[in-house]
Image (spheres, grey):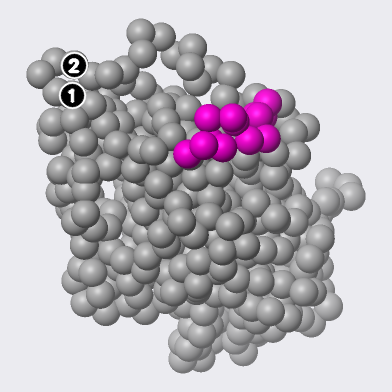
């Protein structure tokens, strides 16, 4: 194994034969454990993150200790100089093959773990989009409850300070969205990609609006309807299992798209905003909340871990392209806000939830699901902290004859993210 993992490896690597390589610099926060020769076989046949991800999901490779420390080696090695890198590279790949042959680990490729997505058909057609959504979201409502906590909100929270409780931070995010949209009692709100209904319930309860909330996920729709009933808001909130392309009962005074835009795809960017614009009433506002990539960064590759195991067909857009696409379709962009640091805090809070409920999560969703999410959440948090990924709220309006209906200042929503939300505004009582 030493031919593949030379001395000086920062994190110790323990192999299935009991040998240990690396970690000579002192106590390490984690140990990489190659539990089986199959770990090498997967890495050799799929060099890079996909092979490593497959080995981890299958249980052939394990991380004992701090996952953040292991994944953080990217930053540590990057600061050590240009020659330091985690990728195998051509020479490393050749060493891997040679080591695998000597260890008797080189055979035909192993079948990928069952949790790997294999979608068919043309990208971003309604049928394939439905399959992609089902792969990610129809995993188990009980699993997501353990991961997300009582708020059941699967998007970036808004933290008044780093110590804010996750549920309170999610409530603050909901209020920030509602404030930016300027919601008033009696208005109609379209919630595109409504998840388990948390924003729809918040908007109806606190702002007295009528909400149409759509999702492609069968599991989400079922639980969202139940939560709406339990909140006694069935007269204000309609949960639909529906593709956004099929919504045709506008106009809406406001539209919120929170954590859904990543599934739209670059090829449909203009059509997406054109359809939402047509659903908006004159002077109606649209808030698009989405993860974004830096300018010049390439889109996810088909053989990436995220594409195969987390968000199949997911695409992150650069925020400038998003702004241009909105304005090209007659939407006037009025505000752009980055919440990058907030998402890093959110991801670390979700990771803590997952670790605290690990055994239960594996029981309700299978052993592969929490392993996938442990790897995905930690890697994503580090990406947001390092600035490799961001998240933006872009607020736009459909102007009417030059009149936007927008306030002169941001004062109406600047305090909305503090978490200081009235329990039930009096204006709602009579709505």
Q: Which residue is mark 1?
A: 399
Establish if 52 lies above or below 397.
Answer: below
Of residues 150 and 391, which is closer to you in this image? 150
The residue wearing badge 2 is: 403
Residue at the extreme left:
401
Secondary structure at numbered mark 2: loop
Viewer-proximal residue among 198 and 354: 198
Q: Position of residue 88 (x, y in %)?
A: 52, 59
Residue at 56%, 37% (x, y): give it. 429
For label 1, the SS is loop
* Separation (CA) of disc 2 from disc 1: 6 Å
**Residue 34: within the magenta?**
no
Q: Can you see residue 266?
A: yes
Report the span colored magenta. Answer: 419-431
Given contact means CB atoms under 8 Å apart, are the residues at marks 2 and 1 in contact?
yes
Residue drawn where x is 30% and y is 31% of the image = 285
Question: Residue 216 location, x and y as percent?
Answer: 37, 67
**Position of 290 compared to 398: left or right?**
right
């Amino acid at each position: 194994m030493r031919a593949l993992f030379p001395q000086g490896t920062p994190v110790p690597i323990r192999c299935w034969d009991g040998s240990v390589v690396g970690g000579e610099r002192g106590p390490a926060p984690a140990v990489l454990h190659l539990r089986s020769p199959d770990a090498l076989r997967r890495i050799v046949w799929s060099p890079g993150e996909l092979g490593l991800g497959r080995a981890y999901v299958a249980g052939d490779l394990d991380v004992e200790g701090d996952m953040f420390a292991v994944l953080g080696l990217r930053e540590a090695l990057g600061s050590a100089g240009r020659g330091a890198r985690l990728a195998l590279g051509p020479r490393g790949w050749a060493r891997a093959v040679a080591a695998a042959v000597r260890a008797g680990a080189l055979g035909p490729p192993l079948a990928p773990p069952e949790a790997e997505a294999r979608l068919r058909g043309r990208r971003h057609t309604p049928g394939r989009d439905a399959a992609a959504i089902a792969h990610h979201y129809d995993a188990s409502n009980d699993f997501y409850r353990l991961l997300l906590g009582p708020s059941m909100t699967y998007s970036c929270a808004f933290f008044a300070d780093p110590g804010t409780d996750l549920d309170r931070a999610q409530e603050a995010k909901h209020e920030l969205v509602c404030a930016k949209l300027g919601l008033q009692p009696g208005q109609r709100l379209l919630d595109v990609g409504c998840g388990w209904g948390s924003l729809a319930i918040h908007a109806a309860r606190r702002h007295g609006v009528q909400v149409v909330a759509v999702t492609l996920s069968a599991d989400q729709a079922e639980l969202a309807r139940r939560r709406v009933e339990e909140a006694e808001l069935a007269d204000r909130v309609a949960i639909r299992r529906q593709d956004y392309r099929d919504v045709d009962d506008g106009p809406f005074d406001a539209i919120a798209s929170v954590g859904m835009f990543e599934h739209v795809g670059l090829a449909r960017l203009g059509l997406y905003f054109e359809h939402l614009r047509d659903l908006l009433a004159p002077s109606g506002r649209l808030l698009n909340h989405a993860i974004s990539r830096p300018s010049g960064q390439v889109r996810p590759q088909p053989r990436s871990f995220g594409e195969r195991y987390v968000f199949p067909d997911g695409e992150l857009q650069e925020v400038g392209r998003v702004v241009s696409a909105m304005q090209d379709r007659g939407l006037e962009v009025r505000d752009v806000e980055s919440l990058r640091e907030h998402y890093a805090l959110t991801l670390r809070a979700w990771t803590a939830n997952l670790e605290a409920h690990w055994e239960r999560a594996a029981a309700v969703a299978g052993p592969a699901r929490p392993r996938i999410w442990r790897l995905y959440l930690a890697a994503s948090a580090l990406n947001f902290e390092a600035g490799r990924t961001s998240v933006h709220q872009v607020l736009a309006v459909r102007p009417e004859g030059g009149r936007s209906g927008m306030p002169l200042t941001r004062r109406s929503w600047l305090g909305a993210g503090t978490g200081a939300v009235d329990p039930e505004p009096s204006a709602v009582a009579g709505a």
